[in-house]
Image (cartoon, coloured by chain):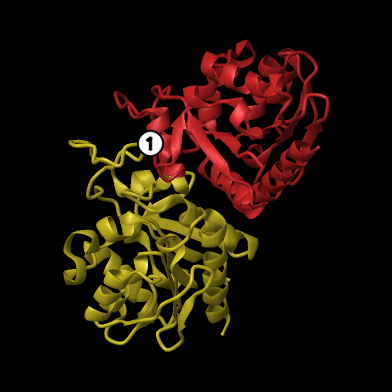
Chain colours: A red, B yellow
């Protein structure tokens, strides 16, 4: 089986990839015996957040790819090197990095635009007929990437679900242990830390998401 | 059950806590239904490593506690606040941060000194008769913390094992999926990424370590 591409957005829930979600994704893939390759945009994060205080570290700059390399143990490539041809599927973990660095949802809400490099990479999997998985807040990009009517979940948050629908998506409420599958768009989503009270809860949904994405690869 | 204390050393394999090992530790605790509390020293890392290039980022400074907060999703306290009385056990994940920020093994080898705050915190669990778990390279601190004859593993690396013994420890070779238990010192160790070829292998040993530590808590 070709490796699964995992698109990261930094390393830390408040300004990058949610670390638990990213690691749980890699764990589920590794336990399924499926190889993975990590990618991230080679550009600066929107900002840097001090994760102890929750405050923005004014004047500090960090590169998305360089920080994401911490999760990938150095084994990561720039998003510009990602080819759908070389992979069986793509998965995007969550964290504010997905809403700040991969798109601008955290700033613009339903006016959200997905970064061109991210949009192009994700659409290349759709064009190749290959499945995708979106975790936590990452599904907010689905209406822009897949277009009108795509079915997905960000959990149960009313405002975020409304934005998903306003952008043309078909939002489904979903508990943390479950996933929403849109078979026609070959995409799976799960709430993870949009709802999870602890890491074990997040793991349950992410394991199901990985299993569903892999099942689609095999069809 | 009282929570388990987890001592972190930053966030990233080359200059802090190995992120996978730290997350796998939290996952195993959460799945066992046991609460945890994260701690880290509130002082600067030895240095900052660019995890994409592997090179030291000259002139850059990062605080161990602030970076470790990325793994803990902000829920972390300074190591100085750690009381053995309030916890059932302590676990130290690995990564170069254990050998650079918690002790100076990465620089001095068998002349290794454990940082005073770390030594004091870890010894308080021994004095309270409470169990400990050391993952990956973190066990290199065990001879200094527990004293002569403590049994542990750093996997199979000949030079590191020799240093462990030179410092007074009783090193046991151990495969990645297994743990070494020293019942008289109530301490468990596992090689994790000292040997792991992938995250699933690291997870297997860490899950066993957490199970053994928790079993000792219940005795």
Looking at the image, residue A138 lies above or below residue B145: above
Corner quadrant of residue B127? bottom left
Q: How many labels does the image show?
A: 1
- Quadrant of the snapshot with the N terminus of chain A: top right
Q: In this view, does B53 lie to the left or right of A33?
A: left
Residue A105 in the image: state x and y as whole percent: 58, 19
Q: Nearer the viewer, residue A110 or A113?
A: A113
Check disc 1 and report the residue beneath it: A50
Q: Nearer the viewer, residue A18 or B219?
A: A18
Q: Nearer the viewer, residue B17 or B127?
A: B17
Q: In this view, does A189 lie to the left or right of B94?
A: right
Residue A90 in the image: state x and y as whole percent: 63, 32
Residue A132 in the image: state x and y as whole percent: 69, 31
Q: Is residue B104 visible?
A: yes
Corner quadrant of residue B108? bottom left
Q: Which chain hosts label 1? A: A
The residue most toward the top is A111
Q: Which of A208 and B118 is in front in this view?
A: A208
Q: Can residue B74 be seen in this view?
A: no
Q: Which residue is drawn at 39% across and 48% down?
A: B68
Residue B104 in the image: state x and y as whole percent: 21, 61
- Quadrant of the snapshot with the C terminus of chain A: top right
Q: Is residue A148 left or right of residue A73?
A: right
Secondary structure state at the residue bearing disc 1: loop
Q: Which residue is drawn at 46% across and 25% down?
A: A41
Looking at the image, residue A154 lies above or below residue B99: above
Corner quadrant of residue B7? bottom left
What crowding class fits label 1: few (fewer than 14 Cα within 10 Å), some (14-19), or many (20 or more)? some
């Amino acid at each position: 089986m070709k490796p699964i591409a995992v698109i990261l957005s930094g390393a830390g829930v408040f300004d990058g990839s949610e670390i638990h979600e990213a690691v749980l994704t890699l764990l589920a893939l590794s336990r399924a015996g499926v190889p993975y390759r990590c990618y991230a945009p080679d550009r600066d994060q929107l900002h840097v957040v001090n994760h102890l205080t929750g405050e923005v570290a004014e004047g500090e700059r960090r590169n998305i790819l360089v920080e994401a390399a911490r999760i990938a143990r150095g084994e990561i490539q720039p998003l510009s090197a990602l080819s759908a041809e070389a992979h069986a599927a793509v998965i995007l973990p969550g964290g504010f990095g997905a809403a700040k660095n991969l798109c601008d949802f955290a700033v613009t809400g339903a006016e959200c635009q997905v970064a061109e490099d991210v949009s192009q990479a994700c659409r290349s999997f759709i064009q190749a007929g290959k499945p995708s998985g979106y975790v936590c807040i990452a599904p907010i990009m689905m209406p822009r990437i897949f277009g009108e009517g795509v079915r997905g979940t960000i959990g149960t948050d009313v405002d975020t679900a409304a934005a998903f629908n306003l952008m043309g998506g078909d939002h489904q409420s979903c508990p943390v242990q479950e996933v929403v599958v849109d078979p026609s768009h070959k995409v799976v989503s799960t709430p993870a830390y949009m709802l999870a009270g602890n890491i074990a809860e997040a793991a349950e949904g992410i394991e199901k998401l990985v299993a569903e994405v892999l099942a689609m690869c095999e069809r």
